Image (cartoon, coloured by chain):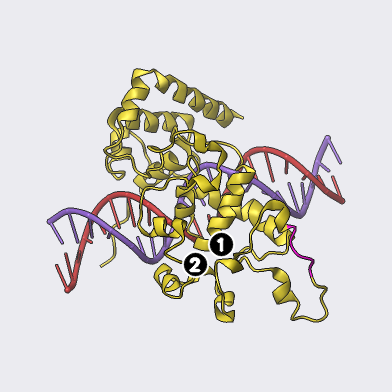
Chain colours: A yellow, B purple, C red
Amino acid sequence: MGRQPCCDKLGVKKGPWTGEEDKKLINFILTNGQCCWRAVPKLAGLLRCGKSCRLRWTNYLRPDLKRGLLTEDEEQLVIDLHSRLGNRWSKIAARLPGRTDNEIKNHWNTHIKKKLTKMGIDPVTHEPLHKQVSQDSSSTVTVLPESDQLGYQSVETDRQLTSEENSSPPENSSSDELRVQGVYSDEDPLMSSLWSDEIPLLDASWKFPSAENDYSNVGVTTWEGNCEWLLDYQALGIEELVFGSVNIAESSDKL
DNA sequence: AAACATTGCAACCGCTCTAAT
DNA sequence: CATTAGAGCGGTTGCAATGTT
């Protein structure tokens, strides 16, 4: 017995969102809060799949999102977290307030990967590339990393990789396996907080520039039952402000 | 100026996880 | 315990913007 599709494929619009659709979605969520996403499109008068609405909201419309490129510090944090967590983008994103997993994933694939490769670091294993290359005697040994210039820390200190592990990226092993293997230590504050599934908060040691801002109630991935701020938004007339950005989206649609 | 190549990002797809029954 | 439905995640794709020839 197959699973029901998340939405009726018939009559469901796909592709880029229009300003009008954004407006409807924002308006609905500001007014009603977040109930079940499956019901959102119907209630909001959208011809979209609930999943699509959730994605649009979490990746683009959420008012607490930061826009623009990742800062150097954020990038560094992403690299560090990736070396520990692998492609667990949502876990990584949880450590960067105002950033989405999609955004970080895109930034990783388009910028950081290249940067690391250029630096002679394998973006998958975080191992120096020359280790693999040097096996081929004909190739020149890559001079290693300007990594220090960027503050990149080899993960060898954190992870004692066997040659087998070296051939399989972290994401190929289950987290529990890795923990059992001692790859991640429970004494590592980052890892232990991740294991315990607490609401992510920036550790002071990250020296993240925006840590001065209070994001303590923003890091939650769902704000069900925690949407008082929406009412505040409305009371303060911030809805207008939000829609201002929608207008920008609308105008960009016309371009 | 035009054609082509590359890049970057928003959005989709399909799978897994989890909670409810 | 098994089944089901919904939510979330990570990989991938499509396309507009930008750069290069």
Q: Quadrant of the N terminus of chain A?
A: bottom left
In the displayed structure, would residue A225 be above or below residue C13? above
Tell me the SS state at disc 2: helix
In the picture, measured across the screen, residue A147 lies left or right of residue A29, that is right
Image coordinates of residue A242 in percent, x first then y, are 45, 25
Image coordinates of residue A40 in percent, x first then y, are 31, 39
- Residue A171 circle label: 2
Label 2, residues with CA under 10 Å away: few <14, some 14-19, many ≥20: some
Image coordinates of residue A131 in percent, x first then y, are 71, 75
In the picture, measured across the screen, residue A11 lies left or right of residue A146, that is left
Label 1, residues with CA under 10 Å away: few <14, some 14-19, many ≥20: many
Instruction: Give the residue type that dot 2 points to.
Output: Glu
Q: Nearer the viewer, residue B4 or A183?
A: A183
- Residue A83 circle label: 1
Mark 1 — on which chain does it sit?
A
| Residue at 74 percent of width and 59 percent of height | A118
Disc with the residue nearer the chain's start (1 vs 2) = 1
Which range is magenta?
A142-146
| Residue at 45 percent of width and 71 percent of height | A178
